[in-house]
Amino acid sequence: MNETATPSFPKHLLDFQDWRRTQVESLLETAQMMQEVLARPVKKVPALTGFTVATVFFEPSTRTRISFELAARRMSADVVSFSGAVSSTTKGETYRDTLRTLEQMGIDAYILRTDAAGVPHQAHRWLHKPVINAGDGWRAHPTQALLDAFTLREKLGDLEGKKIAIVGDILHSRVARSNAELLPMLGAKVVACGPATLLPGSLPGTTLTTNLKEALAEADAVMALRLQKERMDKGLLPSLPEYIAGYQITEERLRWARPQAPLLHPGPMNRDVELEGTLADSPRSLVERQVANGQAVRMAVLYHVLV
Ligand code: NCD
């Protein structure tokens, strides 16, 4: 594949299977330009005038949904929102009917979050317009990984050879999976760490370990993840105090990483569980920066899949 050619972009973002490094890099450059738009007093450009995007969320969300909706509005797109609470036993047909209904109303792009893995891929086949995955079950959350990569590059520069430690409930985390796909594509080494019960058997693109000290050693950045209790079968977590004793990111443990290694968290955060509460507000924390960057990255994604 010719890596130097000017990239054209896949007209969807389901995961990174169809994306090449040059395309990702150029998307991150667009996000940088969007950041400049967001720094203006009037944060609006006409790029998506006349387009209508739908956020279709079958699972709760605060930052992802608002971030996408603002991203679309800042580029002058019209936005409609659909929230569906579905049980995990309700399968394909419901999603399909909902999406096909929206399709009849002239939606130009779908931003989709589901509790079941693979639905955005199916939607991509059902619909004739771009589909952006805003999180499907345990599987993927590509815009979160893009904003993490953007934030990491802003702080660390080129990610080539950088060690990124991801700590927490790796097993249930679509954020970990998408980062495991994207960060190595940008040259980073990813180490994923958690208790054995919360690690998958294997995670391509990463080294897995239960040893926190080993994971944090020489790490250039540390990402803490929430314990996703809503996705856990009973019995995976011995007890919260035991988890905290072994895996909570504390100021003291952060000393195992490189000096000044930043701390990231995709949110929602459980202070004093996956990380020492005060660390989230310390100068090491990039948590708020991640949220701010999320909007610029989602503007770039919408722009590239629609225009
Ligand atoms: C994550 C998600 O929903 O996958 N949150 C987010 O989008 N920022 C992580 C989580 O729920 O723990």
Image: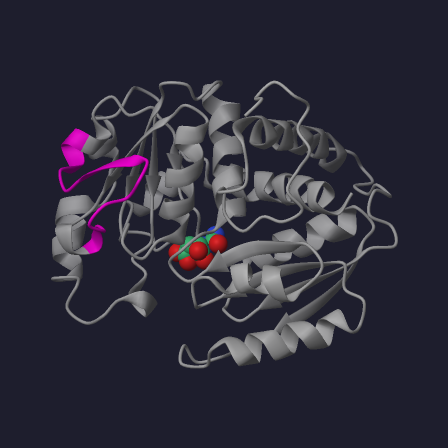
**Residue 203 rendering spot, x and y as whole percentages:** 28, 44
Query: Eyeballing the image, is 226 above or below 4?
Result: below
Judged from this view, the residue extending furthest toward the front is: 1
Q: How many marks?
A: 0
Task: Name the quadrant containing residue 294.
Answer: top right
Residue name at image x 33 percent, y 54 percent = 226
Q: Residue 53's quadrant in the figure?
A: bottom right
Identify the colour scheme used.
one colour
Nearest the viewer among 171 and 61 is: 171
Quadrant housing the N terminus: top right
Q: How far from the left and from the top, in percent, is residue 199? A: 21, 50
Residue at x 13%, y 62% (from the top left corner): 239
Query: Within the image, what quadrant is residue 125 found in?
Result: bottom right
- Which residue is rendered at x = 14% and y = 57% of the image? 241
Quadrant in the picture for the C terminus: top right
Q: Nearer the viewer, residue 238 or 134?
A: 134
- x and y percentages locating residue 130 in the rendered image: 68, 54
List x then y, in percent, for residue 184. Answer: 39, 30
Q: Is residue 199 magenta?
A: yes
Q: Nearer the viewer, residue 27 or 272?
A: 27
User: Against 163, is 91 above or below?
Assistant: below
Residue 5 visible from this viewpoint: yes
User: Horizontal placement of 150 versus 177: left or right?
Assistant: right
Q: Is residue 61 visible?
A: no
Identify the residue at image location x=68%, y=39%: 300
In the picture, measured across the screen, residue 223 lies left or right of residue 202, that is right
The span picked out in magenta is: 198-214
Tell which of 253 and 142 is nearer to you.
142
Asked if residue 92 is among those painted magenta in the image, a careful observer would answer no
Where is ligand 1, by quadrant?
bottom left
When the figure is inspected, residue 79 is found, relative to residue 147, above or below; the finding is below
Q: Going by the image, does 211 lie left or right of 233?
A: left
